[in-house]
Image (cartoon, rainbow, N blue to C red):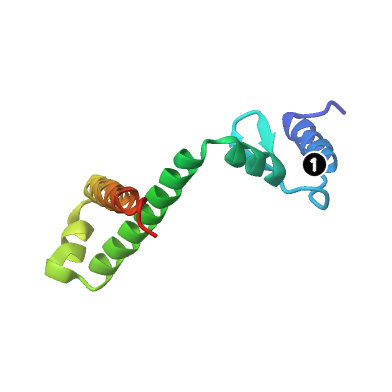
Amino acid sequence: MAKGKNQLGGLWVAVLAKRLDTRRFQPYALIPGIIWTKEMIRRYWMSLPKLIRFMLTHIANGIAIGCVFLLALIYWDVGGLGTLLQKDTSGLATFVLFFQTALTFGAVSMGVAVMNLGED
């Protein structure tokens, strides 16, 4: 009996799973074709300049705060925002709203952090 496509795919997954023993490390596929481990991510993060890490950390915090803020506005339907977004069938309005809110909160968070850089 000839091996079908599914049998070969299952064999490949079994070989790959054996090769990537998760007890040794946790693989991350950040870039297709490259498997990153936690150690590789940490080394890359620590190789970035200190100011870049500072700014990225504060931007990420601002983006998270902005998304939580917007989710709260949608959940409690402040100003009828939740019902307006429910009427949009494409989801484009929700995406644009999240994108703009995350961008604004991230920029404000980074700006406040940079302005307070010289203070102790």
SS category of the residue bearing label 1: loop
Residue drawn at x 84%, y 26% is: 2
Residue drawn at x 28%, y 69% is: 72
Q: Does residue 46 lie above or below 31 as drawn?
A: below
Q: Quadrant of residue 55?
A: top left
> Which residue occupies the foreground of this view, 61 or 100?
61
Residue 69 horizontal/vertical position (percent): 29, 64
Residue 88 horizontal/vertical position (percent): 20, 52
Is 98 placed left or right of 2 in the picture? left
Dot 1: few (<14), some (14–19), or many (≥20) neighbours within 10 Å?
some
Question: Which image quarter holds the C terminus?
Answer: bottom left
Is 63 placed left or right of 22 in the picture? left
| Mark 1, residue position | 20
Q: Does residue 23 lie above or below 37 as drawn?
A: below
> Which residue occupies the foreground of this view, 19 or 59?
59
Q: Residue furthest left?
A: 79
Residue drawn at x 34%, y 63% is: 68
Residue drawn at x 85%, y 42% is: 18
Question: Which image quarter holds the N terminus?
Answer: top right
Q: Residue furthest right?
A: 1
Q: Residue furthest bottom?
A: 76
Disc 1 marks which amino acid?
Leu
Is 18 placed left or right of 52 in the picture? right
How many marks overall? 1
Q: Does residue 75 lie above or below 103 as drawn?
A: below
Q: Quadrant of residue 116?
A: bottom left
Q: Residue furthest top?
A: 2
Is 16 placed left or right of 79 in the picture? right
Residue 34 horizontal/vertical position (percent): 66, 30
